[in-house]
Every structure is written in structure tokens, then in C-alpha cells.
Amino acid sequence: MTISNAQTEVDNWIKTYGVRYFSELTNMAILTEEVGEVARIISRQYGDQSFKESDKTKDLGDEMADVLWVLMCLANQTGVDLEAAFKKNMEKKTNRDSTRHLDNEKLK
């Protein structure tokens, strides 16, 4: 599935089951909440915090997919083609950082 296909699938789902998009501001708040859920799992699985009993059933992939879902909602609402934006961003990073990390002694 391409990113563009995924954006279309999200849009179709919203129109079929979701009635309408939440406002952009509401979706921004939801995105922040979903990123927090990803952070919670990572801080417990890879960091120093221990899992609470209620956290043990959380699925990192599912929470990441929630982040992606809301990001696609925001992209659809604001007219952003995430596939084109991602390609452009990768080109920017490659042009800007093609040797930066390779030359970084801290990373060797």
C-alpha cells in the first residue's frame, strides 16, 4: 500500500463510518495524545520505567498505527499529499546530510 493509498483509505473510512473529520485542532490534540501513548510504551519497554499492569497489554505497532492514522487525517484535512511530501523531505535530508552522519565521530 502506498502512502497515497493509505490517505485515500482513511478518507473513505471517515466518510463511511466517521460521519466527518474532527476539527484540525481536535485532531492535533489527538495526535499529541497518540504520540504520548507511543512514548509511554517505549519508555517502559526500552527505558528505565516499569510497566504498570494496565500497560502490559498495549501494542507498540497498534499505537504507532494510531499516530499514522491521525497524521493522515490531518494531511487530508489540510490538503497535504504525504507521499509527495515524504519524497521531498527524503531528498532534502539526503542533500543536506549525505556525509554529515558518516563524518560524525560520535556515531562511529
Image (spheres, helix red, strand yellow):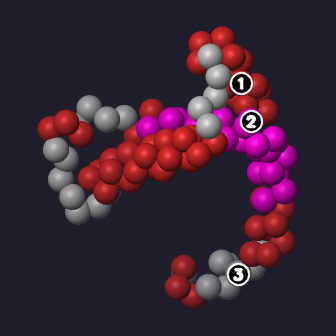
Residue 75 or residue 94, whichever sits in front: 75
Tell me the quarter of the picture where residue 4 sits.
top right
Magenta range is: 63-89
Q: What residue is at 44 percent from the left and 38 percent from the top?
A: 63
Left or right: 11, with 50 as reference point: right
48 is within the stretch colored magenta: no
- Placement of the C terminus among the 4 image quadrants: bottom right
Secondary element at image label 3: loop
Q: Name the residue under label 3.
A: 100
Which mark is in front, 3 or 1?
1
Estimate how packed mark 2 is, as few (under 14), some (14 to 19) or many (20 or more) residues with alpha carbons within 10 Å.
some
Between the residue at mark 1 and the residue at mark 2, the CA separation in whole angstroms equals: 7 Å
Q: Name the residue under label 1.
A: 11
Q: Check whether the beta carbons of the residues at disc 2 and disc 3 lie within 8 A of each other.
A: no
Q: Can residue 64 be seen in this view?
A: no
Tell me the quarter of the picture where residue 5 sits.
top right
Q: Mark 2 points at which residue?
A: 76
Left or right: 47, with 83 as reference point: left
Q: Is residue 5 visible?
A: yes
Tell me which amino acid carries mark 3: Arg
Left or right: 98, with 34 as reference point: right
Q: Residue furthest bottom?
A: 105
Residue 48 in percent (x, y) is at: 23, 63
Tell me which amino acid carries mark 1: Asp
Tell me the quarter of the picture where residue 88 sits.
bottom right
Q: Check whether the beta carbons of the residues at disc 1 and disc 2 lie within 8 A of each other.
A: yes
Secondary element at image label 2: helix
Left or right: 48, with 101 as reference point: left
3 or 1: tag closer to the N-terminus = 1
Tell me which amino acid carries mark 2: Asn
